[in-house]
Image (tube, rainbow, N blue to C red):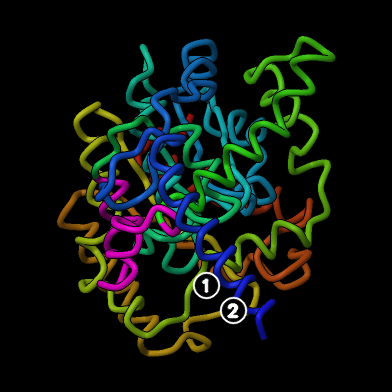
Amino acid sequence: MRSIYQYLLITSLSLFILGLILPHWTHTQYPKALGPAFTKEIRKNIQVDIDEVKPEIFLLGNSVLNDGIDPEQFEALTGKKVLQYGIPGSASAYWYLVIKNNIVTASSSPEYLLLFFLDNLLTKPEGGVNGHYLPLIDEIADDDEQVLLQKAYINQLNPIEAYLDSHIPLFGERQTVKNKIDNRIKYTLPQLLLKCNKPCLDDALDISFDQKNMLPQTFQRMEIENMSRSDQEWVFFAQIDRSFLPDIIRLTNERGIKIVLVREKNEKIFSIAYESLQTRKYFSDLENYLTTQCVPLLDFSHDPALTSDLFHDEMHLNQRGKEIFTQLVADEFLSLFDQRQ
């Protein structure tokens, strides 16, 4: 019994001391602002590519886009220079940051932005922002992302979580401590042994872990993690003001970029008959909202040309499917803007 009391005393004392040390180590004053603290540096690789390539059309999405659209074929069909970025596992928060901190800040922004999505990702701001996605978000966020913090993090906290996060260092700094340890492990040895600094290693990892080098099942799992089936999250007008969609539309409008939303197909939903009434209502409300914002929606979710044999899993198309989907999107794009060559 005495050893148990000693253990509890030592553990409690250690946690207390750690709680006092953490704010000084992380340079954080408590009570602190809610949400993660992002670094000031913004990764600008997409902006650099835009400035170099000067695309007329920018295609943005996740791994479903990578498996669904052939950028070279799309460029040949439309007669316009194309740049495509599909970030596996990404969702609306990441797309918002790419647009805000890379696309609209480029010296020559694209004329068109096609944003590809599945299900309710456009109105699910908390998708792809925590856990192993947090470092990805930090890379393209600066240290004053108030919209991101509010919509992706603070709005998702209940009162108890909010209090613990802002007042208890052990709780509030848990992710910071993990990231510092991860970064020490990740960047120190390459710097010492190979003289490869942070940008060098990030580029090397991007190449090594590019989607074409990974198992398809990995990306199917990542996309499914970000899609939600909660009833409340399928009530469009309950979610729109809490989402990044209004901010995405505002940013592109201010920069003079014509944004087009492209709804991709889920292999399990062959026609509207397979959708629930709630899902139908959600997309009807989305379409009506986009009409008021003068934003086109290209909806391929029930396209009969995309048959089940063209998918290699629930969401990702095979090579033949990619060719067909690329043709479909290019045709609809040209028809939409009456630019057929």
Residue 124: mark: none
Q: Which residue is mark 1?
A: 302
- In this rendering, the answer to whether 218 lies above or below 96 is below
Crowding around mark 1 (Cα neighbors within 10 Å: few <14, some 14 to 19, many 20+) is some
User: Which sits in the foreground, 189 or 251?
Assistant: 189
- In this rendering, the answer to whether 162 lies above or below 67 is below
* Residue 146 location (% of width, % of height): 24, 42
Give the total number of marks visible in the rendering.
2
| Residue 15 is at least partly visible in this image | yes
- In this rendering, the answer to whether 48 lies above or below 260 is above
* Residue lying at 43% horizontally and 52% vertically, measured from the top left: 19
Between the C-alphas of marks 2 and 1, the distance is 6 Å
| Residue 98 is at least partly visible in this image | no
Instruction: Examine the image and state in which quarter residue 74 appears.
Output: top right
* Residue 168 location (% of width, % of height): 36, 58
Label 2 with label 1: CB-CB less than 8 Å: yes
* Residue lying at 25% horizontally and 45% vertically, measured from the top left: 147
User: Which sits in the foreground, 10 or 93?
Assistant: 10
Quadrant that contains the N terminus: bottom right
Q: Main secondary structure of the magenta part?
A: helix
Residue 270: mark: 2
Question: Does 89 sit left or right of 273 as displayed?
Answer: right
Q: Is residue 127 inside the magenta stretch?
A: no
Highlighted range, magenta: 147-171
